[in-house]
Amino acid sequence: MKIKTKLRLGFGFLFIIVLSFGLIALFYLNELSDKSKVILKDNYKSLKYVAAIRNVIDQNNFPLSQKQESTFAENLENEGKNITEPGEKVAFQKLETAFKTLISTTTITIKENSIRDLRFALQNIEKVNMKAIYDKNELANQASSRANLYIMIAATLSFIILFTFIVNFPGFVANPLAEFSAAIKQISRKNYKQRLHFENDDEFTELADSFNGMVVKLNEWENSNLSKIKSEKSRIEAIIAQMQDAIIGLNEKGEVLFLNHLAAKLMSLDEDKVVGQNVAELMQKNELLKRIIKPETADNTLKIYADDKESYFLLENREIIIPNYEEQEEKTLFASSKSAGSVYTLKNITQFKELDEAKTNFIATVSHELKTPLSSIKMSLKLLNDTRVGNMNEEQHELLNHIKEDSDRLLKITSELLDLSQVETGNLKLTFAITKPEEIVRYAVDAVKFQAEQKSIELVLNCDQYLPSVNADIQKTAWVLVNFLSNALRYSSEKSKVMIDVFQKDKFIEFSVRDFGKGIDEKYQKRLFDRYFQVPTDGQNKSGSGLGLAISKDFIEAEQGKIWVVSAIGEGSKFCFSLPVVE
């Protein structure tokens, strides 16, 4: 039976029940109304006529006047036409006979007897009608009780039938839908053994057959891809096992999914026993694993004793994000992706570290060896400029100045390379001393004063004499400030200004050098403090080694300070660093 037919039959049945109840109630209400009408109809008229006749007898003396006699006769005639109850006719005949006798006789005794008969006949009529009213009232009450009983029975039966219908009938539609919903949830959990079976010949049965066919196809598709997935899993496991980097994978619950042989060897773990265990429990027994999963510092380079020597590894961590296809508890908002775990990789950079150390040592050695002959060259140049050695022409003086500039530049580069080698090898030695900020600034200004005078550049110093002291290496800090001032003078036009500001900000002393040159493009500012990086120039200014700002950053950060730059094209540049105040 089709669902539409079931609905029609169900609502038709409800209509019949409601109609039947209405007809039963209407039938008994009509019966009760008829009984009530009978009570108030004939008997009420008879009592009315009797009362009118009694008033004529009681309120007047005999013989009656013609009008009174006419009233009596009229009511008597009406009563004669309204005889409805047993015994009422006999009483009426006696009343009529007594009235005729009363009218026709003149004897006082006969009149008195006639009046007495009249009263007795009236009492009989009243008694008959009153008894009839009482009996009919009892019948009406019985009919009312019977009507109430039948209506109550009909209402109870209708309620039971309707309640049963309301409870059971929606199940014809709701129950199959609930089964479909539960089956779909099972399919979403990849339970392809789920089937639906309906024996009714309706649309749900057809839909269940289509659903079962779909599940069969899904199961076939899943089985066809299962072998591919297993094959891919084996291939990925083989690739991970053959990787030259140590790798460990965790799922979203923090359980170990996989780790290759190299990772197990580095962390002294049994790869067969570790897989499936919670990494939080393993970290309590393995310090190296704890450093990998929860590093204490931002440095991603780990020094591990491996291959019978100290080796260096670069730690990389990547969270795996996948689409979220699971059922969501929240109905309005849900996440479109979720974490499937994390992968930790240790890349062996020992060879690169050794090469870097060799490079650093080579640079330090070469720089140290170059510094001595360069110093001798500078001394020789100074002697050549002395007139006591001999006079030179203008061209010789010009050549000598070029040689001096180049030797100064080479000497500066070798000094920077030596400082860089100290930083990279961890041999940077700072001589801390509590000093006034103005001493550092005066030292730096004196070092570049001659260079500023050559370009007619005014050095404007704003420094409070009562600033608190800082704990710093005076020479290294002044070197940083000299580097800032040299760059500012190099890129400033002649007869311009260079501003030097020193002031306290919170618990730091801030040093800044500002020039009014062309400024630095924003895309270069993030790399200014990188080693060997140089801002592209127009060829008018000689560029350095690209190490000055990088070394400056290392010096300032070693003193627990901060260094930065603020610049804009056409507005000049402002290089700043800050050092903590001595408590």
Image (tube, grey):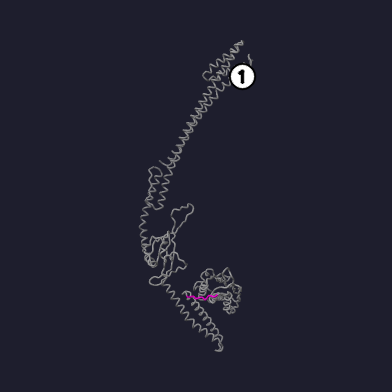
Give the SS element for disc 1: helix
Amino acid type, mark 1: Asn
The picture places residue 147, in percent across and down from the top left corner, at 49, 30
What is the count of numbered marks? 1
Relative to residue 279, is residue 135 drawn left or right?
A: right
- Whether residue 555 is visible: yes
- Quadrant in the picture for the C terminus: bottom right
The picture places residue 399, in percent across and down from the top left corner, at 53, 84
The picture places residue 337, in percent across and down from the top left corner, at 45, 57
Q: Residues within 10 Å of mark 1 (few under 14, many from 20)?
A: few
Q: Quadrant of residue 74?
A: top right
The residue carrying mark 1 is 55
Pick whichever, 371 or 431, lies toward us. Answer: 431
Q: Residue at x 62, y 18 (%)?
A: 58
- Whether residue 20 is visible: no
Look at the image and say whether residue 353 sits in the magenta stretch. Answer: no
Please identify the dominant SS of the magenta region.
loop
Q: Quadrant of residue 340?
A: bottom left
Residue 163 drawn above or below residue 49: below
Q: Residue at x 38, y 45 (%)?
A: 197
Q: Quadrant of residue 13?
A: top left
Pick whichever, 377 or 107, lies toward us. Answer: 107
Residue 565 drawn above or below residue 128: below
Look at the image and say whether residue 428 sits in the magenta stretch. Answer: yes
- Quadrant in the picture for the N terminus: top left
Which residues lie in the magenta part?
427-433
The picture places residue 511, in percent across and down from the top left corner, at 57, 72
Q: Residue at x 36, y 56 (%)?
A: 226
Pick whichever, 313 or 426, lies toward us. Answer: 426
